[in-house]
Image (cartoon, helix red, strand yellow):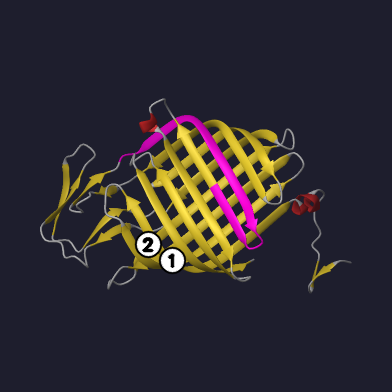
């Protein structure tokens, strides 16, 4: 008999053993420190030092004709600005699923879905700059919803909102496939939805907030995915995802994620992250850069 450790190999039903051989799954548990800067055209640039914990799982199923992947990212972090106490800075839960039927080695239809949300409420604190006067929350039609006198803290959105969904169907093509670099392009029909509930956007003077509305769009989508091995200990990953609902460029929404990872040891790496996005609800560019010293354990 075959044994795994002290346990006998389980008896599998017909076909299950072959399926198991085609499935790979890896989980990375990591903690990091980071220096963060963000550019926001509606507010002030910010700089801070943060601590974060991330759980990353990627599960793949691959055969000659079928390829499916499920990616789960859960990340929480706290930030300290100046003399302030640590406050929540990173709050992310994301699921990405993709299925590709391989008509050939380089070509095939795809189906994908993305869910992005957060676990906790989003608050703005005035502890470091006592608020004098009235903080006003406006509706999406500019009517006054509430007036909060001399607040210490204001909630901008509750747990799990905004909830952002993406779906796409089309053709996947492998542009490059080698040890050094892999590149794929996906072209097809895409849709996006953003659901909000009692959610607001802070004004540039931070004395009021405007209510956000649900948003949805459908149109042509393009996704460009690249992962490159620049050196023995340096990897670069990039994903550009755009939805074009009309010829009006003001209606286009996209996200561009980039990460350069430098492996310092087997469990310590330096991550340089640069993200740029334009969302349905905000209709403006938002940027984020991160420098993370990450301590990782793989399972």
Where residue 132 appears, as percent x and y from the top left, is 11, 61
The quadrant in which the C terminus is found is bottom right
State the predominant SS element of the stretch in magenta.
Answer: strand
Left or right, 209 with respect to 280, comes to: left
Q: Which portion, as a residue range, is magenta?
A: 213-238
Q: Nearer the viewer, residue 191 or 205?
A: 205
Residue drawn at point x = 64 percent, y = 55 percent: 229
Where residue 213 appears, as percent x and y from the top left, is 31, 39
Question: Is residue 126 shown above or below 275?
Answer: below
Left or right, 33 with respect to 112, comes to: left
Residue drawn at point x = 44 percent, y = 63 percent: 76
Element marked by disc 2: strand
Where residue 55 appears, as percent x and y from the top left, is 54, 62
Magenta stretch containing residue 127, yes or no?
no
Q: Are marks 2 and 1 in contact (CB under 8 Å)?
A: no
Task: Please rate how many residues cluster around mark 2, counting C-alpha atoms within 10 Å: few if below 14, some from 14 to 19, many from 20.
Answer: some
Check residue 89 in the rendering and tell me which mark sits there, or answer none.
2
Residue drawn at point x = 18 percent, y = 39 percent: 142
Element marked by disc 1: strand
How many dots with numbers? 2
Q: Nearer the viewer, residue 120 or 186?
A: 186
Magenta stretch containing residue 221, yes or no?
yes
The quadrant in which the N terminus is found is bottom right
Residue of label 1: 34
């Amino acid at each position: 008999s075959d044994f795994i450790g002290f346990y006998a190999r389980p008896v599998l039903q017909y076909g299950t053993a072959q399926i198991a051989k085609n499935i790979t799954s890896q989980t990375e548990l990591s903690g990091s420190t980071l220096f963060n800067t963000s550019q926001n055209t509606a507010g002030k640039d910010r700089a801070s030092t943060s601590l974060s914990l991330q759980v990353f799982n990627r599960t793949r199923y691959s055969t000659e004709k079928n390829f499916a992947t499920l990616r789960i990212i859960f990340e929480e972090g706290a930030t300290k600005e100046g003399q302030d106490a640590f406050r929540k800075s990173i709050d992310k839960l994301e699921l990405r699923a993709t299925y590709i039927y391989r008509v050939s080695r380089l070509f095939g239809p795809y189906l994908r879905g993305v869910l992005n949300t957060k676990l906790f409420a989003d608050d703005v604190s005035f502890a470091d700059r006592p608020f004098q006067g009235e903080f006003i929350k406006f509706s999406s039609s500019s009517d006054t919803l509430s007036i909060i006198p001399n607040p210490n803290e204001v909630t901008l959105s509750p747990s799990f909102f905004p909830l952002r969904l993406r779906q796409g169907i089309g053709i996947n093509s492998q542009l490059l496939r080698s040890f050094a670099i892999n590149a794929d392009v996906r072209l097809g029909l895409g849709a996006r939805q953003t659901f909000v509930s009692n959610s607001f956007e802070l004004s540039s003077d931070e004395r009021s907030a405007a209510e956000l509305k649900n948003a949805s769009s459908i149109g042509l989508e393009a996704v460009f995915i690249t992962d490159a091995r620049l050196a023995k200990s340096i990897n670069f990953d990039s994903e550009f995802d755009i939805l074009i609902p009309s010829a009006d460029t003001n209606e286009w929404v996209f996200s561009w994620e980039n990460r350069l990872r430098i492996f310092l040891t087997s469990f310590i790496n330096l991550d340089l992250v640069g993200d740029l996005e334009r969302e349905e609800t905000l209709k403006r560019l938002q940027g984020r850069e991160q420098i993370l010293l990450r301590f990782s354990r793989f399972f």
